[in-house]
Image (cartoon, rainbow, N blue to C red):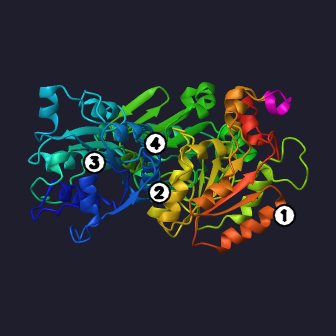
């Protein structure tokens, strides 16, 4: 590489501020417009007090999903790619981070101001490689999925623009996009001045006080109030504040699928993870019996539209810096302030005796008879209930596994990661890579559908190359099972044919994984599964891929209940 300059540069500034914000690793895909920044990251002598580690990924999807998952544990993540072809490929992961409130920093290098770049191209009408001819197109694509999207054009303004974007990302828990002209990587700039400023969320004390008083009155008047612990508790570091409020009030609580394990599920008052009709019976009935739902920091998706449609007025929703109580909305109310004010408003109220408690963890049995020696969804996940250890992080993909794996108890905070709101299939496998980097002591266990895995299969190579140890279970049935159930569940209940567009080509996943440097096994029987599970648990030093062969017409009963909007029965 060309030697790095002696002066302090924009590259150095970006590295130091990212490190100060809590970042330690960058997920990258190379390209000539961004490659110079990688030289700075890879030079251990350049920023010895604020080092970053660069991890090369096989695609922008992988880099983005890995950075997203990393952010869930570390509080900030970063994916760096090149202009045009890289930046546009990164849009989907960043959109998911935006929806699920994750401050991922998307960095792109772009054509600069040197004579061989934009002026030359404009004079002679030459299209630069990776460009569309609209040199703001990349930035424009990110404006609606970030809290700040910047094109940084000169070194003098770079520090202020970088600081502003990173501050907004950390304040609002949303992604930012930083596009730097490539001639700036070596450009001299000022060193950081003082600590990185993170702006305070807009706050109206009157609204905070009124919202807390109104919520306290509703809770006091309710016979069966229920807390709904949401994902913002984790994003803003408010798990302890919520636990204190729950203990003070004595109210039971549920989580959404997105927020599962926001507290360890051994916590006092936890009832279960609510997923609508696919919930276990106890959790479903608890929500049905509640006369007030107090949502603390969760977005409401169409998984929960039945609750909203049933009675809009019996919900309190604190989310995105506002509180809605029935039809009234209180703006500029940060969640931290609301929790504190609500606790103060209820300080004279004695803790209630629990009106609901957690039932047993349940995995629905097979929905139809299968030969007793075969692995099925129900039998596999029933085994996972006792195979999973407390130091494992469960990562289900948006697949048939998601709504069944959520019934596995997770006895560690942040021990379950899912992209349950955005729902991009393929997310989980690359997320497993990111999680293994963010917390090497917690082994990711991925439950991937075969269709989703095929989208990011090369991530196994990254895991093996960097010596990571996720376990990736590929649930192989050669069908987009959850899509089939949602479009025509009679395929399973009445043996109707599969939709052609839901069929997936068969792969030899175990052989594929071995070719990429992983340990691998293919299992179809319960006896073989048991032997492989023992070997996988014993070997914590390698990435493992386990190809779990399922009957073609197998589907979790939880998915059928979701698809047909059928509530659970006692025992489910």
Give the CA distance from mark 4 to mark 1: 39 Å
* Position of residue 143 measured from the top left corner of the image (x, y, whole percent): 31, 32
Which residue corresponds to mark 4? Answer: 100
- For marks 2 and 1 on the same chain, the one whose residue lies earlier in the sequence: 2
Label 3 or label 1, whichever lies nearer to me, is: 3
Tell me if 493 is positioned left or right of 499 in this view: right
Number of numbered discs: 4
* Position of residue 528 measured from the top left corner of the image (x, y, whole percent): 81, 63
Range shown magenta: 490-497
Give the CA distance from mark 2 to mark 3: 24 Å
Which residue corresponds to mark 2? Answer: 434
- For marks 3 and 4 on the same chain, the one whose residue lies earlier in the sequence: 3
Number of residues whose C-alpha sits closer than 10 Å to that of mark 2, classed few (under 14), some (14–19) or many (20 or more): many
Secondary structure category for the residue under label 3? loop
Give the CA distance from mark 3 to mark 1: 51 Å
Give the CA distance from mark 3 to mark 4: 31 Å
Which residue corresponds to mark 1? Answer: 527
Number of residues whose C-alpha sits closer than 10 Å to that of mark 1, classed few (under 14), some (14–19) or many (20 or more): few
Q: Please determine whether, in this image, residue 240 is positioned above or below residue 569.
A: below
- For marks 2 and 4 on the same chain, the one whose residue lies earlier in the sequence: 4
Which residue corresponds to mark 3? Answer: 32
Number of residues whose C-alpha sits closer than 10 Å to that of mark 4, classed few (under 14), some (14–19) or many (20 or more): many
Secondary structure category for the residue under label 4? loop
């Amino acid at each position: 590489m060309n030697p790095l300059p002696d002066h302090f540069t924009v590259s150095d500034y970006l590295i130091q501020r990212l490190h100060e914000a809590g970042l330690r690793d960058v997920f990258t895909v190379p390209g000539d417009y961004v490659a110079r920044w990688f030289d700075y990251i890879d030079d251990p002598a350049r920023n010895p007090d604020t080092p970053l580690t660069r991890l090369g990924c096989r695609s922008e999807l992988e880099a983005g999903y890995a950075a997203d998952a990393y952010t869930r544990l570390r509080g900030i993540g970063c994916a760096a790619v090149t202009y045009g072809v890289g930046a546009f490929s990164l849009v989907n992961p960043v959109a998911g981070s935006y929806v699920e409130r994750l401050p991922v920093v998307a960095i792109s290098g772009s054509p600069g101001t040197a004579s061989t770049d934009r002026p030359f191209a404009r004079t002679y009408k030459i299209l630069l490689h990776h460009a569309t001819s609209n040199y703001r197109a990349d930035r424009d694509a990110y404006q609606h999925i970030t809290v700040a999207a910047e094109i940084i054009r000169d070194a003098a303004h770079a520090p202020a623009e970088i600081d502003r974007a990173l501050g907004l990302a950390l304040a609002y828990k949303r992604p930012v996009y930083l596009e730097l002209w490539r001639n700036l990587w070596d450009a001299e700039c000022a060193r950081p001045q003082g600590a990185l400023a993170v702006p305070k969320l807009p706050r109206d004390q009157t609204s905070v006080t009124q919202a807390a008083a109104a919520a306290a009155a509703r809770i006091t008047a309710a016979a069966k109030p229920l807390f709904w612990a949401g994902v913002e508790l984790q994003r803003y570091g408010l798990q302890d504040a919520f636990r204190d409020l729950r203990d003070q009030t004595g109210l039971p609580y549920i989580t959404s699928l997105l927020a599962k394990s926001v507290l360890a599920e051994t916590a006092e008052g936890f009832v279960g993870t609510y997923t609508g009709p696919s919930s276990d019976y106890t959790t479903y009935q608890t929500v049905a019996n509640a006369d007030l739902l107090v949502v603390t920091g969760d977005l409401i998706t169409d998984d929960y539209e039945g609750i909203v449609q049933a009675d809009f007025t019996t919900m309190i929703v604190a989310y995105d810096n506002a509180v809605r109580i029935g039809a009234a909305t209180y703006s500029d109310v940060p969640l931290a302030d609301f929790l504190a004010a609500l606790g103060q408003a209820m300080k004279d109220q004695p803790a209630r005796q629990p009106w609901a408690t957690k039932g047993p963890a349940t995995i629905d049995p097979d929905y139809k008879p299968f030969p007793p020696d075969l692995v099925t969804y129900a039998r596999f996940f029933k085994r996972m209930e006792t195979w999973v250890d407390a130091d494992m992080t469960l990562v289900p993909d948006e697949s048939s596994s998601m709504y069944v794996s959520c019934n596995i108890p997770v006895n560690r905070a942040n021990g379950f990661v899912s992209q349950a709101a955005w729902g991009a299939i393929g997310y989980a496998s690359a997320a497993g890579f990111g999680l293994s980097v963010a917390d090497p002591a917690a082994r990711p266990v991925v439950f991937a559908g075969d269709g989703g895995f095929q989208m990011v299969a090369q991530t196994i190579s990254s895991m093996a190359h960097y010596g990571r140890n996720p376990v990736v279970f590929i649930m192989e049935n050669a069908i987009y099972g959850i899509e089939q159930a949602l479009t025509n569940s009679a395929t399973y209940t009445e043996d109707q044919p599969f939709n052609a567009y839901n069929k997936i080509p068969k792969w030899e996943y175990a052989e594929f994984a071995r070719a990429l440097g992983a340990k691998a096994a293919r299992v179809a029987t319960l006896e073989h599964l048991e032997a492989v599970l023992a070997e996988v648990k014993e070997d914590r030093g390698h990435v493992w891929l386990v190809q779990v062969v399922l009957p073609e017409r197998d589907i979790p009963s939880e998915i059928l209940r979701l698809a047909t909007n059928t509530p659970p029965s006692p025992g489910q």
